[in-house]
Amino acid sequence: RAKTLPHVRVLAGGEPVPGPGFFFQPTVLADCKQRDEIVQSEIFGPVVTVTPFGDEAEALRLANDSDYGLASSVWTTDSACAARMAARLAYGCTWVNCHLFIVSELGHGGTAHGQSGYGKDLGMNSIEDYTCVRHIMIKN
């Protein structure tokens, strides 16, 4: 749907893959606006939007302007910038110079404010998330 918007440019892909199933070419979209569905929705597919920004503050404002909070990534050669950005991104998981690198020891999941589902997968966080600690006292 995004490519039907007059301001969106498809830089790569943008078409279904021929054959059975519901597969889509890896797609890169440019010139999307912050309120566009493609920017504001979780897209579970090989699709990325490219958004220019002027400085770190604007990048954080744009990135955190979302109802979702599952995952984010920072791409930079500046390790100090990576640390600042990762600390301020409101996402359950932030990768630096990679994406979707998951290890079983670390919990993976969204934030409390996000619409990316509830809870954590993997690690001790997931066990705690599915546990209800109770306290019962009986006086004799």
Image: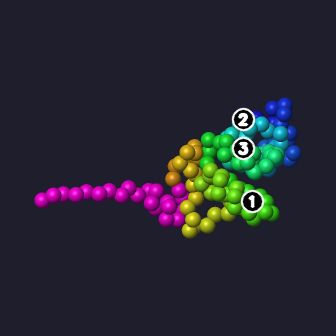
Q: Earlier in the sequence, mark 3 or mark 1?
A: 3
Q: CA distance from mark 3 to mark 1?
A: 16 Å
Contact, mark 1 vs mark 2 (Cβ under 8 Å): no
Q: Secondary structure at mark 1?
A: helix
Q: Mark 3 = which residue?
A: 62
Q: Can you say whether 52 is above or below 129 in the image?
A: above
Report the residue marked by disc 1: 81
Q: Say left or right for 89 vs 25.
A: left
Q: Secondary structure at mark 2?
A: loop
- Say above or below: 128 vs 2: below
- In depth, the one of 11 and 112 nearer the eye is 112
Q: Earlier in the sequence, mark 1 or mark 2?
A: 2
Q: Amino acid at mark 3?
A: Leu
Residue plotted at (79% across, 49% down) = 55
Q: Report the residue at 54% width, 58% height from top.
A: 121
Would you say residue 43 is visible in this rendering? Answer: no
The picture places residue 138, in percent across and down from the top left corner, at: 18, 57
- x, y percentage for residue 51? 80, 45
In the rendered image, residue 134 lying in the magenta stretch gets the answer yes
Instruction: Name the dominant secondary structure of the magenta segment.
Output: loop
Circle 2 Cα neighbour tier, 10 Å, few/some/many (<14 / 14–19 / ≥20):
few
Query: Which residue type carries mark 2?
Result: Arg
Residue under label 2: 35
The total number of labels drawn is 3
